[in-house]
Amino acid sequence: MALLTPLFAFLYHLPQVYKWLLKPYYIASLFMSVAFLLVRKTPGVCEHLSTQREDGNSCDFDWREVEILMFLSAIVMMKNRRAITVEQHVGNIILFSKVANVILFFRLDIRMGLLYLTLCIVFLMTCKPPLYMGPEYIKYFSDKTIDEEIERDSRVTWIVEFFANWSPECQSFASIYADLSLKYNCAGLKFGKLDVGRYADVSKKFKVSTSPLSKQLPSLVLFQGGKEVMRRPQVDKKGRAVSWSFTEENIIREFNLNELYQKSKKLSKGKAEKFPPVPEEEEVEPEPETKEEESESKKDK
């Protein structure tokens, strides 16, 4: 059963995988991911490569290359345990395949390693992953409209995602958030997004750090009556985001979306509905400092 479940999940998402892999970004990424394999196995090219195999066959992997590829497989399996969407699974495979290719090419020939690394840098700077372009019921805010919208009608509950286009986590979460908006959007429950990468003042106002080290992107904030009621992920006193998985099930449970929807869809212009109860936010205590952090704080003092 442990082996069949991932297989069935893959077959279920197979049409979506094909749809994403046929985009130019992923086609180029896949070719770069298997570059070393193509060079090592292509007749007419592999004969001119060096090898550490005892039989001198330069068109097959030596023991060290196999070891590197096995290590890569183990890392990908560990990273994909926490992956939520198909895009995250594919992205992890492509990322670590490129890292392995850099190591393998440098080990084979430093000139080939430099050439491949240069191609990766150029590709990273010029090509961006495709953004989600599917259906959604989401209002996109600017720094001038967010306050006006969430305070316009105190009966309307808003769920706002603070995101940045450069964040891989935000890109992966886009399709999940869009699906939630299609299922739960109604007169009294609305979904919004704001790009804190563009509006730095808004990120400071709502205390959403855009630093990759803070791991606060994306951040989901629930507003009722124009005021923040709860957010995920929570942030401790040191500004660190508490680990939280942005799955559809977690969001529905934590934000009480089913009850919110049932109450909010009955909203009429002449009668205000009481908000359904939302779990109270608990103050998050910071994690205990390590010995290194304690010594650094003493030096600062």
Image (tube, rainbow, N blue to C red):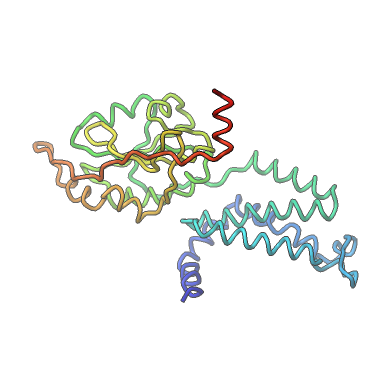
Residue 280: image quadrant is top left
Q: Residue drawn 90% across and 73% down?
A: 55
Apparent side of residue 142 relative to residue 17 in the rendered image (left or right): left
Apparent side of residue 69 relative to residue 144 in the rendered image (left or right): right
Residue 78: image quadrant is bottom right
Q: Residue drawn 23% across and 29% down?
A: 152
Residue 49: image quadrant is bottom right
Q: Give the image location of residue 59, x and y in percent.
A: 84, 67
Q: Residue drawn 33% across and 29% down?
A: 146
Q: Give the image location of residue 29, x and y in percent.
A: 64, 52
Q: Pick the quarter of the image with the C terminus.
A: top right
Asked if residue 68 is positioned above or below residue 187 in the image, the reply reads below
Asked if residue 298 is positioned above or below residue 78 in the image, the reply reads above
Q: Give the image location of residue 265, x and y in percent.
A: 18, 47
Q: Out of 52 and 114, give the one closest to the viewer.
A: 52
Q: Out of 70 and 294, give the one closest to the viewer.
A: 294
Asked if residue 192 is positioned above or below residue 16 in the image, the reply reads above
Q: Residue drawn 36% across and 47% down?
A: 136
Q: Give the image location of residue 210, x and y in percent.
A: 49, 33
Count the labels in the image. Answer: 0
